[in-house]
Image: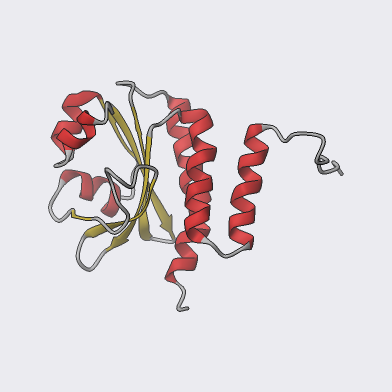
């Protein structure tokens, strides 16, 4: 069994990120978990915007629960995804969406001007799924125009790390 690092022994960034996520879950704090997942993923993805959205299947809307840039994308904001190719791909088919370059962002997102103004040129949207139900999405936007397979895998892992928070939010309080 490996000993836990002492206070004098700093944690490696990835381990510190996992510890922050675990602490947020131990405190039953979904918002802190989303923030810790954002920080954990940033070390790998080097994204500049992370948002987390809850999905309401009845209205085909996503509602923002978390944003790393609340001035530009405040929590509580919502978007109707009825009839959109993105909504079908991510929310209904439950597949990761990768948008590379300004043309892809313009094609799939109504707020493409705001995204461009933030200097963001690629996106990975990860559906958070339990059983056959999409609960929401974890979204990473980067200033670089392309993403790698390793980026997609890291984003998928971050989506999986968000599952307990989404499950907790579904439970009656």
Residue furthest out toward the top:
145
Name the foreground residue: 105 vs 88: 105
Give the percent coordinates (x, y) of residue 82: 15, 56
Q: Residue at x 14, y 34 (%)?
A: 107
Residue 151, image x, y percentages: 44, 29
Depicted 167 relative to depicted 140: above or below: below
Percent position of residue 134, x then y: 35, 58
Residue extending farthest to the bottom is: 172
Q: Residue at x 47, y 57 (%)?
A: 31
Q: How is the image coloured?
A: secondary structure
Name the image quarter holding residue 40.
Answer: top right
Does residue 173 sit above or below 69 in this rendering? below
* Residue 59 coordinates in the image, percent (x, y): 19, 66
Q: Foreground: 151 or 50?
A: 50
Name the residue located 85 percent from the left edge and 41 percent from the top edge.
2
Image check: 18 left or right of 159?
A: right
The number of callouts visible is 0
Quadrant location of the N terminus? top right
Relative placement, left or right, of 10 versus 112 is right
Up the image or down, 162 lies above or below 121; here it is: below
Residue 15 figure quarter: top right
The residue drawn where x is 19% and y is 36% is 114
Check the image and name the residue furthest to the front: 71
Q: Is residue 28 left or right of residue 5?
A: left
In the rendered image, which quarter is residue 16 located in? top right
């Amino acid at each position: 069994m490996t000993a836990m690092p002492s206070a004098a022994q700093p944690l490696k960034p990835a381990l510190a990120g996992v510890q922050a996520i675990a602490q947020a879950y131990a405190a039953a704090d979904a918002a802190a978990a989303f923030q810790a997942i954002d920080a954990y993923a940033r070390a790998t993805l080097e994204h500049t915007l992370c948002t987390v959205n809850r999905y309401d299947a009845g209205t085909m809307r996503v509602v923002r629960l978390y944003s790393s840039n609340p001035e530009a994308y405040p929590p509580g904001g919502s978007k109707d995804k009825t009839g959109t190719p993105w909504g079908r791909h991510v929310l209904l088919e439950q597949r990761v969406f990768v948008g590379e370059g300004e043309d892809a962002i313009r094609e799939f997102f109504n707020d493409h001007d705001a995204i461009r103004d933030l200097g963001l040129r690629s996106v990975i949207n990860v559906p958070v799924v339990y059983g056959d139900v999409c609960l929401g999405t974890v979204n990473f936007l980067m200033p670089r125009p392309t993403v790698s397979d390793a980026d997609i895998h890291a984003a998928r892992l971050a989506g999986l790390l968000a599952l307990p928070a989404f499950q907790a939010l579904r439970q009656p309080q």
